């Protein structure tokens, strides 16, 4: 035991120095580990933030592109022909996102004879569309679901008049045919029966093939009809 005390007394400075070195090394390891962990967390956070930022920018670019395309489509200009019972009939330039109600408003609104219940004011407009507003008494019965026509669909208003003001005998219904001079209920029925049996008229002279329509009758009608 005495020898141990003597040894400690002899090497006490070395022992103390060794302990100090060990403490310093341990503290250094702890500090290094702590800084490394924080740095890793910071790098991970920065990486996550950078990834989210790139994703946000990418999404913003896609949304901006889609919004611009939608905006361009909404502002694309088309032409519609507004006819019938409006104050200012004519061809109007409108936006593709506009409705029939907008076209009627551009044409000065309905006049006093307009039958507004037979027209779909909520329908979207398309290029070369014809918006026809019938007058009161022109269409009998309940309103149809779609009374607005394009050039390729001329069945509105019971077979509406053509651009020249003539009645299309291939599309006019019974009440429309009776508006022609000299055409009553019976002759209108004969025209409709002929269309169902023989197909559409190829020219106005084909009316001569309908029973009761002679050369004189057809000649008087030619200025008022079309096919």
Image (cartoon, rainbow, N blue to C red):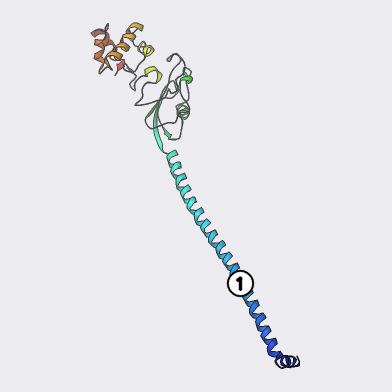
> Looking at the picture, does residue 190 appear above or below residue 52?
above
Which quadrant would residue 167 be assigned to in this image?
top left
Residue situated in front as seen by the camera: 86 or 22: 22
Q: In which quarter of the image is residue 224?
A: top left
* Image location (x, y in percent) of residue 156: 39, 21
Badge 1 is on which residue? 33
Is 32 left or right of 210, judged from the image as shown? right
Q: Is residue 99 above or below residue 40?
A: above
Farthest residue in the right direction? Answer: 2
Percent of width and height locating residue 154: 36, 22
Up-down: is 163 above or below 7?
above
The reply to whether residue 181 is in sight is no
Q: Quadrant of the N terminus?
A: bottom right
Coordinates of residue 36 in the picture (x, y in percent): 58, 70
Quadrant showing the C terminus: top left
The image shows residue 202 at horizontal and vertical percentages of: 25, 18
Residue 68 visible, this angle:
yes
Residue at point 69%, 87% (across, down): 15
Q: Is mark 1 on a helix, strand or loop?
A: helix
Decide which of 66, 31 is in the foreground and name it: 31
Residue at 42 percent of width and 40 percent of height: 73
16 with respect to 76 (left or right): right
Q: Which residue occupies 64% across, 77% down? A: 26
Disc 1 crowd rating (10 Å Cα; few below 14, some 14-19, many 20+) is: few
């Amino acid at each position: 035991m005495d020898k141990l005390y003597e040894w400690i007394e002899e090497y006490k400075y070395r022992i103390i120095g060794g302990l100090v070195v060990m403490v310093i090394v341990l503290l250094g390891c702890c500090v290094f580990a702590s800084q490394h962990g924080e740095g890793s967390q910071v790098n991970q956070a920065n990486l996550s933030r950078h990834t989210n930022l790139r994703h946000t920018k990418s999404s913003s670019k896609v949304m901006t592109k889609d919004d611009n395309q939608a905006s361009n489509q909404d502002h694309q200009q088309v032409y519609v022909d507004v006819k019938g019972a409006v104050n200012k009939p004519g061809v109007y330039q409108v936006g593709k996102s506009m409705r029939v109600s907008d076209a009627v408003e551009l044409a000065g609104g309905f006049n006093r004879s307009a039958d507004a219940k037979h027209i779909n004011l909520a329908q979207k407009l398309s290029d070369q569309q014809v918006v026809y507003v019938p007058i009161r008494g022109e269409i009998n019965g309940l309103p149809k679901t779609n009374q607005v026509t394009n050039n390729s669909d001329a069945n509105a208003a019971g077979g509406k008049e053509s651009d020249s003001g003539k009645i299309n005998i291939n599309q006019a219904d019974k009440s429309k045919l009776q508006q022609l001079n000299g055409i009553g209920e019976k002759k209108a029925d004969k025209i409709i029966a002929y269309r169902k049996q023989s197909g559409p008229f190829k020219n106005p002279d084909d009316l001569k093939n309908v029973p009761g329509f002679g050369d004189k009758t057809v000649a008087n009608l030619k200025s008022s009809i079309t096919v």
